[in-house]
Amino acid sequence: MRSTDHSHIHRYHGSDDTEDRQTSANTVNTLHIRFRSDRYRRIGKQDGKDMTTAIIYASTNGNTKAVAEYIAGKTGGKAVDVKNADTLDLNDYDTVVIGGRVWAGSLPGALVKYIENNKNTIEGKNRALFLCCIYNGEKGQNQCDKIASELGFEKHDYFNKGKKIVLEPGNKVDDFISRL
Ligand SMILES: Cc1cc2nc3c(=O)[nH]c(=O)nc-3n(C[C@H](O)[C@H](O)[C@H](O)COP(=O)(O)O)c2cc1C
């Protein structure tokens, strides 16, 4: 396991039994996990899974913002425009979702910079990326795969017409949330 790889932390979700079995992990991680486990109980559950989710987004015309706020509503998490991301302490969250609108095949520079500046922290979290874009089908998937791979996000998806999609029951964003 790489020293920056804290993916094992996510095995602790909601299970005291699992948590106890992990006390052989190094002390720093164990203390950290206990603290966060306590926060999970206070903050909420989704599908029986305790989690706290931060969504940091960049949106020009509101689609990405609508999806970010929808994810926050469904997870009990917090959606923050990257412009105000300084108000957020990522250490308070166990899941970090990045959401960006795509222009000319790229995410907004401020969002890319945010990911770079917080690389080590984000890499230690359960993390996912979503895009709001106009490309669909194979073109949309390829665009999304390329951006996600460049930024190091294994979990990723894209949405067209973000403002509309969140009004539809059982939409693609719900599927994304279930994979967080
Ligand atoms: C100048 C411009 C460039 C765009 N370039 C792309 C693109 O390269 N790929 C794509 O899929 N969508 C592209 N789009 C569509 C936007 O990504 C899409 O409308 C998205 O929902 C905008 O999100 P927002 O409402 O959060 O700003 C572009 C839109 C504009 C206005």
Image (cartoon, helix red, strand yellow):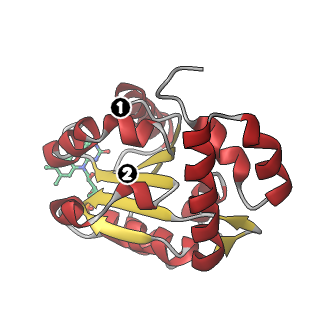
Question: In this view of the protein, can residue 165 be seen by the observer?
Answer: yes
Residue 169 visible within the image: no
Looking at the picture, tell me which residue is in the foreground, 126 or 26: 26
**Residue 171 at what x, y percent from top left?**
59, 66
x and y percent of residue 170 in the render? 65, 70
Q: Is residue 94 left or right of residue 123?
A: right
Residue found at the far top of this picture: 2
SS class of the residue under badge 2?
A: strand
**Label 2 near label 1: C-beta < 8 Å?**
yes
Residue located 43% across and 61% down the image: 92
Of residues 50 and 61, the one nearer the viewer is 50
41 left or right of 5? right
> Which quarter of the image is occupied by the N terminus?
top right
According to the picture, the residue beneath numbered tag 2 turns out to be: 98
Beta carbon of the mark 1 residue lies under 8 A of ligand 1: no
- The residue lying at 54 percent from left, 62 percent from top is 173
Is 140 above or below relative to 20? above
Label 1: element kind: helix
Q: Amino acid at mark 2?
A: Ile
Asked where in the image residue 83 lies, by quadrant, the reply is bottom left
Q: Residue farthest to the front?
A: 27
Q: Name the quadrant containing residue 136.
A: top left
Of all residues, the one furthest to the right in this rendering is: 17
Q: Earlier in the sequence, mark 1 or mark 2?
A: 2
User: Does 7 appear above or below 47?
Assistant: above
In this view, the residue in front, 174 or 14, is 14
Three-letter code, disc 1: Leu
Q: Position of residue 110 (x, y in %)?
A: 15, 47
Q: Quadrant of residue 7?
A: top right
- Which residue was labeled with disc 1? 151
Task: Determine crowd level at label 1: few under 14, some 14-19, many 20+ residues with C-alpha closer than 10 A.
Answer: some
Residue found at x 42% / y 30%: 152
